[in-house]
Amino acid sequence: MTERYLILEDGSAYLGKAFGSLSTTTGEIVVNSTMNGYQEIISNQIYHNQIIVFTQSSIGNTGLDQNAYESIMPTAKGVVVKEYENLATDQFKRISLDRYLKLHRIPGIYDVDTRQIVHHLREKGNMKASIVDVADEHAFDQLHATVLTNQQVSQVATPKPYANPGDGDNVVVVDFGLKSGILRELSKRDCNITVVPWNSTSEMILDLDPDGVVLSTGPGAPTSLPDDVLEMIRNVQEAVPMLAIGLGHELFAMANDAQIVALESMHYGSNHPIREIITNEVFYAGQEQGYAIDSKSINHDKLYITHADLINGTVQGLRHRDYPAFSVQFSPDGAPGPKDAVGVFDDFVEIMARRRDSSETRF
Amino acid sequence: MGKNILDKMAMQRALTRITYEIVERNKGVEDLVLIGIKTRGVFLAERIANRLQQLENVSIPVGELDITNYRDDIEHDATSIDEIKMSNNNIDFSVENKRVILVDDVLYTGRTVRAALSAVMDLGRPKSINLAVLVDRGHRELPIRADFVGKNIPSSQKEKIKVYVNEIDGKDAVEILK
Amino acid sequence: MKQDFKKILIIGSGSSNIGNENEYDAACFETIAAIRKTGAKIVYIDNNPFSVSAEEVQAANVYSLEVNFANVVSVIEKEHPDAVMPTIGGLKAIQIAWQLYESEVLEEQQISLLGIGPQELTKIIDNQKLRDSLTEIGEKTIASVIIANEEEAMDFVREVGFPVIVKPISSSHDTSRFICNNPDELDDAIEASLKRTYINRCSIEQSIVGYKEIEMVGVRDSLGNKMLVSGLEDMDPIGIHSGDSIIFAPTQTLLNKEYQALRTSTFSIMDSLGIKGTCHIQFALNSQTSSYFVTKVSPFFTRNTNLAAKSTGYPISYISTFLEMGYSLTEIKLPSKYSKYTAYMEPTSDHVLVKVPIWPFEDIPDIDQHLNTVMKAVGSTIGVGRTVEEAILKALHSSQLSPRDILPSTSKVDEDELINQLIHPLASRILILMEALRRGFSIDELSELTKIDKFYFYKLNQLLRGQKYVADHPRTLKAVDVAHKYGFGDGMLAEMWNLSINDVRAIGSESANQVTFKMVEPSAGELNDSTDTFYSSYEMENESESYSTDDKVALVIGRGGNQLGPNTAADYYTAKILLTLKKTGYRTIIMNTNPNAISLSPQLSDKKYIEPIQLGNILNIIDLEHPNVVFLPGNRHFLSTELKKFTDLNIVLLPPDQKIAKYNDNQATNAIDVFIDGTTVTPITTIEFSNAKDSNNKQLKYLYNLSEPMLHWETDTEILVDTVTQIINTDYWQGLVQIMFNRQVDGYEFVGIRPVTITETAFLTKTTGVDWVATLVKKYLGKLDKTQIQEQLTSFNHKRRSTMTSVFPFSQLQSNQHDGTVDQEAGAYLTFKNFEEQKKA
């Protein structure tokens, strides 16, 4: 078993053992505290350019299930865990975690004190990290010199439109680094889906005559995208029902005058209670959040805050006052994470149905 | 036992969506009053009012309307009409120049709503009247449509649609009974 | 929505037995602390002499009565509580609650039922109602019908599919069952079954044998907010009772979608039952299809609720008490050691907990030792580790399978027997699984035979590899590191390498990976909780800080997993020691592995270590904590001697080892108990021994029932007191001492002297009103107020007869034995009779 190091920007180093790809890697280090769904996490494009520390003590226990990928080509930069199990079972045609990571050139490191790393990051804040063979000065120099791209969306989102046909509502999904869970939930509700590139204009989108438009999740800062995206959102929200998730939610907020802040303490997990303000109900959902909406910047003539995180206070949902457009910061698709809020998709479909009814039924 | 069409969560979400749509359509909550049609419509109206309170921090008045004596398809015992009228409506606000949202559980033939419209008009002259229903099951006999619908449930006339509300039925659900 | 209650009646769980150790008492202890915060008064009914909770409630409010409907009603009539809490007394308390509702006592007396509404309670009592209600919300339960012929059977099978189980219906205890996978097998099974019945009917049900057994523990508040505390996975498939299964927390082999489906199901079931508080639901999961059945719904505190709490560090009992009283999750204020978010932040853990059951097969030899759907375990131990391997090994070497750190060998089992045991598991199941791996069975083959997920075989294989490496590389640093990583203790290395434990520790001291202690807390490091429960791991960061040198620190070493004999009493004893030490100004540290122990309750001590009770682990803790005194409750002579070899520790063995007892005879009728401090001998009371009415065994070990005072106490006490003061040697005897006699026609014959047993100490505390464990602890700490004790014991006047009757698990285990020995007790109950009433009668 090859020994390797996880090194952090602040000079700390952790000795562990290698699995997956043996390449050297650099990315932003994030901690995910979800207890299930390592496969969904690693294959989610939201982790583009990030090294994921799992707090769950062991991953790989079930192999990788063909039906549970969140993207075809995962682009996470690394995996850090206490223990991994290289289990694959022919019975379910699953491949092992090690093989999957090798296939996609993602390095892993295990047998490190992940609890110590979590405590360290809690204290020191967000930073870059590398998985390397030797933790020498050179490695740290390389780490410091690496500039992480801010073009994450264009690197992972589809460059061309494609169809995911169904018999129901005509939904256009704008891909900012889409996770499959969103398509899965829309498909379950029979939607006829067209996925379009992140830089599509509102004309291109509305020409498809959608019943509704979804702005997808994706990696990186919403502020690194051009203003054209915001313009597109403003035009589309006036025309058809809109659901925005994750990065899409942040962009929806920006399109309606709100400001974005980078979180001091990023949150990737599903343990935070989220309150729906209108009913006061509390539920749980997967959250992958490096940025948040500055709640002070929200223009209350345009937007309601519909949901809030009870731990860090961040805005978790918005709704436009004048249009049937709404957004959630969390991942309601439950891949991974609780399915407590999967009804968000039902709401969206219901809103589309209402609009269709009211435009068709005339006396 | 009936077939469950809406469970508790779906029912809650439908009311939440209706609430947002009411504000969206009325461009705010100014002059808004809610009138629930007895029995279950009242509870639904109260829930919408609670949501508006949470959302906009305003208290929207909720009235209770009993339309038994306005129904044209039910024969009345003439002697007791006034009595019923006196005791069963509970609307302690004026509807004059208000935006009235009528709330009922099921929209079916439209006769209940017609009766409710008459009853409200008897009380004064509102600026507008909108209709919110949890379930629209079709089979209209009058030219009436709802402005806010929780769920369209196509149904045969043989079927019975039953809305349960926790306040009196011990659970929240919509079921089709055969 | 929180309600103000003035007086709450808690229904206790009665005597401990199989499936009922001290977990209910532990839950009750937490509940009492929570209720006190609300200002409500507590009334408590329970006749368990080993209940710590009963001593926490004001004596006047404790009804030491058998927990049954009639007695609960009589307490209600006397006390007029405004609420009844039936959720921490097991199924029996729930049944009583239902009777209270059915008989309209609740309505007449205007009493609220906490936790679950009366209507919903009916569903828990009536299986068919539960099934209907689950079907209504779209949850699947196992279908079963009664059939009279093949046609009806085929109708059923067409609906649910194969496999099915056919069982004859007969009045005799016919336990035969036929699993059918196709129509031919079904024909045969029906023919065979119908022949066995008089009424020509048999039952047919869907077979879920071999499905995974998954358990979910959730909480819900009065507003309908729900949270999942933990998932638990039974390693053993459906077919082996959950109480006899090796259980992992969190779940290990579930896909995200499977886990989330069970979570969602748990929530909708809790909603449909209107739960306020905690709910434990069991599922059968088919991992081929990811489909599942609901197999059991327990809307009250259970053994595995407790396991979920232990595994996550989430204080379920405390929180759920507030939930039952109508508080919402966000309204609950926890003790300051928790983060303010803990109550409503869904627990997530970064460690693994494994529970291994303990069976009474050595104590009661005539029972069927196969593990099946009837629970036979009397206790369990847990191991917590950062890896699955570590947790398994820690749990194992805390269990009876391996009393001395090492894995016992099963190499003598022959091939046929091995396969037989793989299919029909016995208590040694996990060792058999390892042996099969050792002999080269393939993992696919083993998984097929046992229906255990392959994952676990991978892990056991890792353990075997670790063990082999250690054996092949004796006395090397690398081998010590490997051993530590997999959870092997230093004691095992010492044994394998034929070294002393100090030598092993010397080799290990060179390692970069020294022992570290990790916190069991519910946020996986995200929040700054400082919960006080730890487990060991050999990593970089240690989170357990020792107390300052100004603090007086006491380490109490618990007895580990429960077994038959005086074990629940020993746990009571341990808890009382902790309470006394805390009151005396000590920082208290408990080390234990019994998840059901009250001594591990969050509020009972300052610090907890869930670590194997093994020399190496104990020394690691002592090295860190430097305790001023170490208490060893129970007969721990061996451990005490071993410990004394290593460090000059101030060790207190309480009560003293029974080995110092001296007997002239092995039969006795009665005794006098005294308390000896220095040269002062204070008589306490007299005791009469007895056993079951039809028993002829008058030997001491069969005399399990105690009464106080003895027969003829009015006339004979004085004589015995005189005799005792003459014979007792205070140089040799200290503390609580019992002098036994045999009553003859012409007087009393002296039988022997022994330290008062643990069980009897609990009994004496309940009957004399003196806290004897506290008294003993204070004596050994030199802080005893003698005059106070003497004042409390002035009179030998008795107004009542108190009796402690032992409970044996024979019928539950289908043993033919009916008269037991003190080593076979599972628990006991108290009864009191006033002499005046007796006379009247």
Image (spheres, rainbow, N blue to C red):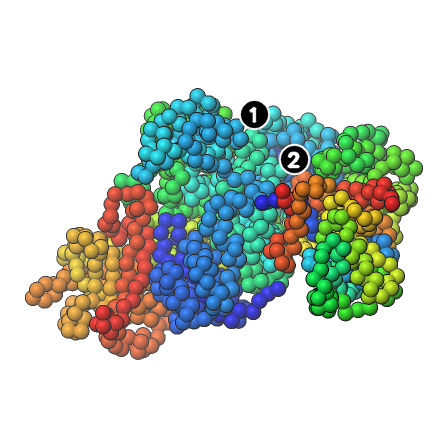
How many marks the image carries: the answer is 2
The subunit carrying tag 1 is: A
Give amino acid for label 1.
Gln
Residue B164 drawn at (x, y percent): 64, 52
A221 left or right, relative to C141? right
Residue under the image location 25 percent in, 72 percent down = C837
In the picture, the quarter occupied by the N terminus of chain C is bottom right
The answer to whether one can see residue C840 in this image is yes
For this orientation, the residue located farthest to the front is: B78
Q: Nearer the viewer, residue C805 or A271?
A: C805
- The residue beneath circle 2 is A39
The subunit carrying tag 2 is: A
Residue C464 drawn at (x, y percent): 45, 32
Q: Nearer the viewer, mark 2 or mark 1?
A: 1
Tag 2, which secondary structure? helix
Residue A91: mark? 1
Give amino acid for label 2.
Gln
